[in-house]
Amino acid sequence: MPLADELLGAATVDALADRLTRALDGRPADAVRRCATALDGLSFSARTAAVRDAVLTDLPDAYPDFERVLRTALDDPGFTGWMTFPVNEAVAVRGLDVFEPALDLLAALTPRLTAESAVRPFLRADLGRALRAMTPWTGHPDPHVRRLVSEGTRPRLPWAPRLPELITDPSPALPLLDALHQDDSAYVRRSVANHLNDISRDHPATAVAAASRWLRPDGTTERLVRHGLRTLVKAGDAAALTLLGHAPDAPVDVTGPTLHTAEIRVGDHLVFDYQVTNTGDRPSPVVVDYVIHHVKANGTRTPKVFKLTTRTLAPGERWAGTRRHSFRPITTRRYHAGVHLVRLQVNGVPRGEDVPFLLADGT
């Protein structure tokens, strides 16, 4: 991920001050200009907040005048990219009381850089009112605005405040996803799939029901549905797997995992062989994964599913391979020494036995 100063550095904020000064009819955006020199050592979120507050200082207090300045700035093609991110956040502060006009302004700003996090205060303040305002955007000619509908309403949008009401009950946003799941833009469809995946974490049956409505016999929506149900597929959800044609009781024979060595160190690779054979008399679609039960700090284990392949095996066909799984330290996972387990699963169902291996400290 880019560093904070690469996204919202002094040069970017200085350029924002230039654009706002022009939109203010030459009255200097002094607070934004000063802010550009005071960003060192700040995280991205802290930079965003600082620039947002500077924008609020420089722009008029009255919302109609505030909006007029930003509409003028939008006439400048150079008013784009990361400089607009804190501007979006300023709209969420200054415009929350006026509501619909501020949301319309965010729709105008989002093609410059997504306003997906800036719409969330409106959704948290009055979900029904915000959804009613956003519904017409599903037919907007700009895909960035259509994506703002599906992405901005995600219950668990990463790096943004969650939407508790939609986590509890995702149904109010489903009509918007219904309107967008066959969008012409892959950018929008990917967002719809990610929203569906968010829903699946809390309401699996609701997610599968929506996917069932969207799945077309001609296969045009299959990629969206597969991506939207990916968490349920990894978890072995029978309804999701069945919808995608992966029968939990698929007639397959599994050999492995056969470890190349039963002891590795942090920083090494776990290497194992495996094979899956279709023992039935019909083609068998299979999702083959492996599960590693990692040792936690307290000595217990927690499973994590990793993908091997998705394919259709002809009757009698055998598919075999070798997997190298890295235990190199990464920021999102800390490894602990101890006896780990690895096992294969096919169509969400564990097959064979848990195979132990020792993970030792890398020092």
Image (cartoon, rainbow, N blue to C red):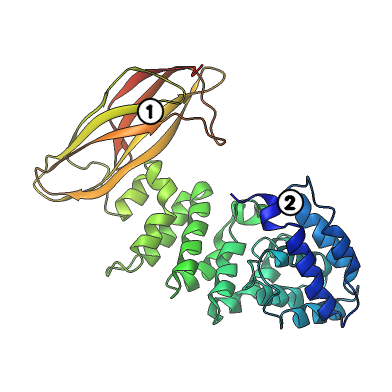
Q: Earlier in the sequence, mark 2 or mark 1?
A: 2
- Determine which of the numbered discs, if any, sits on residue 154 in the image: none
Residue that appears at 65% across and 67% down: 81
From this view, report whether residue 74 is shown above or below residue 300: below
Nearest-to-viewer mark from 2 and 1: 1
Specify the amino acid type for callout 1.
His
Mark 2 falls on what kind of element?
Answer: helix
Going by the numbered disc 2, the residue's amino acid type is Ser
Report x, y in % for residue 145. 59, 74
> In the displayed structure, does residue 229 sit left or right of residue 334?
left
- Residue that appears at 55% across and 76% down: 138
Specify the quadrant of the image occupied by residue 298: top right
Disc 2: which residue:
45
Is 253 left or right of 183, judged from the image as shown?
Answer: left
Q: Residue at x 70, y 72 (%)?
A: 106
Q: Report the residue marked by disc 1.
A: 269
Above or below: residue 41 compared with residue 332: below
| Residue 125 in sight from this viewpoint | no
User: Which quarter of the figure has residue 220?
Assistant: bottom left
Residue 302 coordinates in the image, percent (x, y): 48, 28
* Alpha carbon distance from label 2 to label 1: 36 Å
Quadrant housing residue 236: top left
Q: Is residue 147 left or right of residue 10?
A: left
Q: Residues within 10 Å of mark 2 (few under 14, many from 20)?
A: few
Residue 260's x, y, as percent?
A: 27, 22
